[in-house]
Image (cartoon, rainbow, N blue to C red):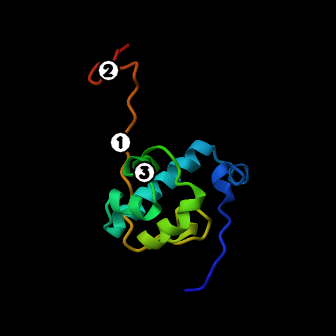
Amino acid sequence: MPNRAVNLDFIGGTLCPAMNKPLSEIEREIIDRTRQARAASGKSQAAVAQVLGVRQDTYKNYELDRCIPPEHVANFCIVTGCDAGWLMGMPGARAPANIKPVRRRAARSKAEPPGRREVG
């Protein structure tokens, strides 16, 4: 496997302005791909957390609401078999063949309880 250098500094935000996307959208995409890659690898969150040297609840946050830190990306890609470029959303990077799209739940408004809508 050729050794390809990937600039991972953009997790902190340096790539965001160049992509003309809000940081939160980029973060959500990375979080979704983290979840997809781990699930496709067949590994549990606990197994991946152990390889990364973090607690399982810390790793769980990487699939829920925090981007995986740059220092863990290489080991994450090794254990899951995904490409770092794809994980970080680099243009032209190909998704692994066994990756299935993530279904996101629609966000509900806290102001509007389920089943109650004002009709006007």
Which image quarter holds the N terminus?
bottom right
Horizontal side of 75 relative to 120 (left or right) equals right
Tag 3: residue type?
Glu
Q: Secondary structure at mark 3?
A: helix
Q: Which disc, if any, is residue 105?
A: 1
Tag 1: residue type?
Arg
Q: Residue at x 59, y 58 (%)?
A: 70
Give x and y (percent) for residue 74.
54, 68
**Label tally:** 3
The residue closer to the viewer here, 1 or 102, is: 1
Give x and y (percent) for residue 102.
38, 55
Residue designated by label 2 = 113
- The image quadrant that residue 22 belongs to is top right
Q: Residues within 10 Å of mark 3 (few under 14, many from 20)?
A: many
Tag 2: residue type?
Pro
Q: Secondary structure at mark 1?
A: loop
